[in-house]
Amino acid sequence: MELDIVALSRLQFAITALYHFLFVPLTLGLSVLLAIMETVYVMTGRVIWRQMTKFWGTLFGINFALGVATGIVMEFQFGMNWSYYSQYVGDIFGAPLAIEGLMAFFLEATFVGLFFFGWDKLSKVGHLTATWLVAIGSNFSALWILIANGWMQNPVGSAFNPQTMRMEVTDFFAVLFNPVAQAKFVHTVSAGYVTASIFVLGVSAWYVLKGRHTALAKRSMTVAASFGLAAALSVVVLGDESGYLSTEHQKMKLASIEAMWETEPAPAAFTAFGFPDQQSRETHYAVRIPWVMGLIGTRSLTTEIPGIEDLVKHAEVRIKQGLLAYDALQQIRAAGSTNAIAPDVRAKFEDNGADLGYALLLKRYVDDPRQATDAQIEKAALDTVPHVPTLFWSFRIMVGLGMFFILLTGTFFVLSVRRQLDTYPWLLRIAVLAIPLPWVAAEMGWIVAEFGRQPWIIEGVLPTAAAVSNLGATSLLITIAGFVTIYTILFVIEMGLMLRAIRKGPELDNEPEAVLISPHIVPAE
């Protein structure tokens, strides 16, 4: 029953997270695109750019509201479903979330109001400032959330206190500048920029195909293609950085993504295609490209990337060392006061404390890890291998779509330069059909990031199975059904509102057109 509770708790959080991330990337990207469009409006005085900003701003507002509604639930889930996790790491994990709420979300929410209701009450520069602050606030929100998530992937700047049984901050700046968190932030934000660019490109292409609002649509396509191409290229570069960091901090995740069962001579080959078989520990019909994985993962020709089999053996060693730390921890807790702890016990814990989390993997099989058999230790070590086929294919779908986005935005960028955006209707149809694909890529990316971390909720520190609340399976099933129902209704409502706004199109603006006559902007006659 305990394992069922763990699986159901994971399922509930996965569902709410995947629903929430349907709204986040579009919010991140559209906020910046709005700021760019309004900047052009302020610089040129052309009313059409104001109409563009208002129109895409309407779609941003619908999406922003749903993102807030679904995001709040996720934070409450830490207390509801993952109470031991919250108690264990609350001193560290809670700080970025609190800063996100105080610094970023309030900033974003405040200036969203000014964006929508300040058009006729603020000066042009004042309203533009509000729009840029919305974009900055949106990205700051992502920063602090991903600092928290990055710490779960690479728990730096912290230490376990055996007296309080909690992880505590030792260096906040190490948490803040965690290289994994920084790489995740820029990669995730860039993916959001791609999502918004493909969305704007596709909707604008639909207008061109229908012969509606073509002037606005073509300008929107030009901005989206330029911004999207830069973002898509940066996603590839930043994804490479994430892969390199995985080699340092999450070796099992990288080996599973590549279905690399055995350690290969450096530089390792990249498996472009194949069918991983976790039972037989081999990849059928593998198509491999020499050297590529070694260059991506290590940026050298001489450094090995360990395979799954060797990493499992290494996990067995760490479990046995963790048992020494677990035994010392029990003696420390039994001693009560700090003065009663024997120096050799303290030394044993300090020497082996980094592997304590590996001993906790045995909790799945035995109440007292010190009583575990060799067979149970071997099973616990095997648990450190995530489901390889899921990671293998999720990663390749994500990468394949990323290459497609570069090709798509690059093509429309060239067409915009040549002023041929409406020359090829079949390309416009592809752009329309491509609208949902960035969300598929984003969800695949989160599956790689979070599913690939299993069985850890905090990499190498706390197993997922040890972090759940003591809830009944019935309660979890009811809440899962409730969340799926409510979120599906919200998603349908959002899609209805978005489609209605798109069909309606931009509203005509009665402000007189302006032309730029240096050094003043004056109304056109």
Image (spheres, rainbow, N blue to C red):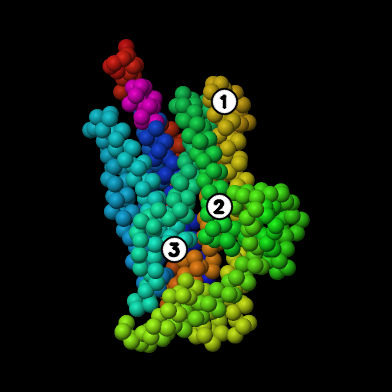
Alpha carbon separation for disc pair 3 and 1? 46 Å
Residue pointed to by mark 2: 244
Q: Is residue 520 left or right of residue 305?
A: left
**Is the residue under label 1 in contact with that under label 3 (CB below 8 Å)?**
no
Q: Residue at x 34, y 16 (%)?
A: 515
Inspect this view and state whether residue 351 appears.
Answer: yes
Q: Residue furthest left?
A: 121
| Residue 41 on the magenta segment | yes
Q: Residue at x 66, y 48 (%)?
A: 292
- On screen, residue 333 above or below 493: below
| Residue 456 on the magenta segment | no
Alpha carbon separation for disc pair 2 and 3? 17 Å
Q: Position of residue 154 (x, y in %)?
A: 47, 61
Q: Residue at x 40, y 50 (%)?
A: 142
Question: Mark 3: which amino acid?
Answer: Pro
Label 3: which secondary element? loop
